[in-house]
Image: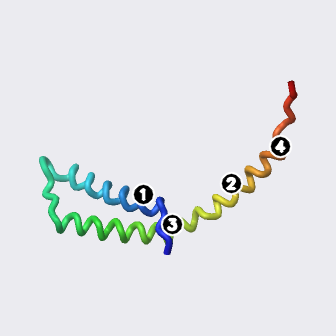
Amino acid sequence: MEITSTDGAVLVYTFGVMVSALWLSTPGNPDINLFVVALFGATSIGWTAYFKWQIAPQYADDDEDDEEANEDDDALTPPTVEE
């Protein structure tokens, strides 16, 4: 299992969304304690694992299609006038 920068971004994003939701749902200063941080951390790790193995593979084929499209684009570019 290789940890990539995408995994880190998903982890931080998920944790941030949950902290933001807590902040918006609690007027004033929300009660952020060790239990809340551990709960949000565990949920973020779970969601990151789900994203890595269930969601991200659906988009792997799109990257390969983009590379093939770029190769075809090079063949279709019009000639330019050399000065």
Of labels 3 and 1, the one closer to you: 1
Cα separation, mark 3 vs mark 1, equals 14 Å
- Residue 55 at x, y = what percent? 51, 66
Give the residue at mark 2: 66
Helix, strand or loop at mark 2: helix
Give the residue at mark 4: 76
The answer to whether marks 3 and 1 mark residues whose Cβ atoms lie closer than 8 Å is no
Give the residue at mark 3: 55
Of labels 2 and 1, the one closer to you: 1
Cα separation, mark 4 vs mark 1, equals 37 Å
Of labels 4 and 1, the one closer to you: 1
Q: Specify the amino acid type for callout 1.
A: Ala
Q: Specify the amino acid type for callout 3.
A: Ile
Which of the 4 image quarters holds residue 57? Answer: bottom right
- Left or right? Give the position of 82 relative to 21: right
- Left or right? Give the position of 69 relative to 44: right
The crowding category of the residue bearing disc 2, from other C-alpha atoms within 10 Å (few below 14, some 14 to 19, many at least 20), is: few
Helix, strand or loop at mark 3: helix
Residue in the foreground of this view, choosing between 82 and 44: 82
**Label drawn at residue 75:** none
Of labels 3 and 4, the one closer to you: 4
Give the residue at mark 1: 9
Cα separation, mark 2 vs mark 1, equals 23 Å
